[in-house]
Image (cartoon, rainbow, N blue to C red):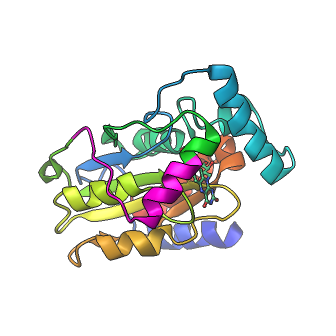
Amino acid sequence: MIAKIIFLIGLVLIGGLPSAAENQQRVLIAYFIWAENTEIIDRTRAVREANTHVFSMENGNGVDEVTTASVLPPGNTARLAGWIQQAAGGDLYSITVKDKYSCYWDEILNRASDEKARDARPELSGHIDLSDYDVIFLGFPTWWYTIPMPVAAFVENQEFEGKTVIPFVSHGTSGVARTIQDLKKLLPRSVKIENEIGVYRSGTADAKRDIDSWLEVLGF
Ligand SMILES: Cc1cc2nc3c(=O)[nH]c(=O)nc-3n(C[C@H](O)[C@H](O)[C@H](O)COP(=O)(O)O)c2cc1C
């Protein structure tokens, strides 16, 4: 932490760090989450099943309905997206699929596993014109050690040529895993990819400060 502060002060002193005010880039914060890609049929069952999983993975650490039952809005990734917007400005965009995911843990796990195995590209229900933006923060949860397949569909459907992409990832015990390397393979060579931030799901509530420090280093 102390080393990070000294590094930041050094950067400011040599004038190498643009302030958020100086950063005139047009920012989009695009993210994909389960909660905005499902319909809740039985809320009690959906929350219970999601939390039972997290409880078993993490011995109950940090389990409460808000931070862990990603089936309910806002979900972890969207909370990170909100903090990025507070600091960096820009527009929020939720990536959504036509065929929604189940609200039940085992069912979404199975479908996501199948989509990964088939390297599927689920049909998206929206489109956004990226020509209005220079920088795209791209957020998603780790799914089966990689990016959710709708994120792959988003990347391939849009014109990313010449943009800067800054990934942010919410994850459980496996961390960001292969997400970033798999994302890089899908983006055109002309894209500048900045260092990502990965946030462990049970640390989401306390992650705002880490987000702010990460953004500061990136010049926002
Ligand atoms: C289908 C599915 C697959 C997942 N696979 C992984 C995984 O491979 N590694 C991991 O650390 N977490 C995995 N998770 C957990 C999520 O990454 C984690 O709970 C994240 O915080 C969810 O973010 P959200 O609230 O924005 O949806 C998975 C969750 C789901 C629903």
Question: Where is residue 95 shown, x and y percent of the image?
Answer: 34, 43
Residue drawn at the location 68% of the way across and 26% of the way down: 45
| 179 sits to left or right of 48 | left
Residue drawn at the location 22% of the way across and 73% of the way down: 188
In the rendered image, the vertical position of residue 36 relative to residue 109, given as above or below: above
Quadrant of residue 107 within the rendered picture: top right
Q: Where's the C terminus, which quadrant?
A: bottom left
Question: Where is residue 38 shown, x and y percent of the image?
Answer: 46, 32
In the rendered image, the vertical position of residue 112 relative to residue 160, given as above or below: above
Towards the viewer: 217 or 175:
175
In the rendered image, the vertical position of residue 147 relative to residue 100, given as above or below: below
Residue 212 in view, yes or no: no
Towards the viewer: 27 or 160:
160
| 53 sits to left or right of 140 | right
Furthest residue to the bottom? 189
| 72 sits to left or right of 84 | right
The answer to whether residue 112 is magenta is yes
Question: Where is residue 170 shown, x and y percent of the image?
Answer: 57, 53
Residue 36 in view, yes or no: yes
Residue span colored magenta: 109-126
Q: Where's the N terminus, which quadrant?
A: bottom right
Question: Where is residue 214 shown, x and y percent of the image?
Answer: 52, 60
In the rendered image, the vertical position of residue 205 relative to residue 133, given as above or below: above
Residue drawn at the location 85% of the way across and 43% of the way down: 60
Furthest residue to the right? 59
How many numbered tags mark residues here?
0
The answer to whether residue 120 is magenta is yes
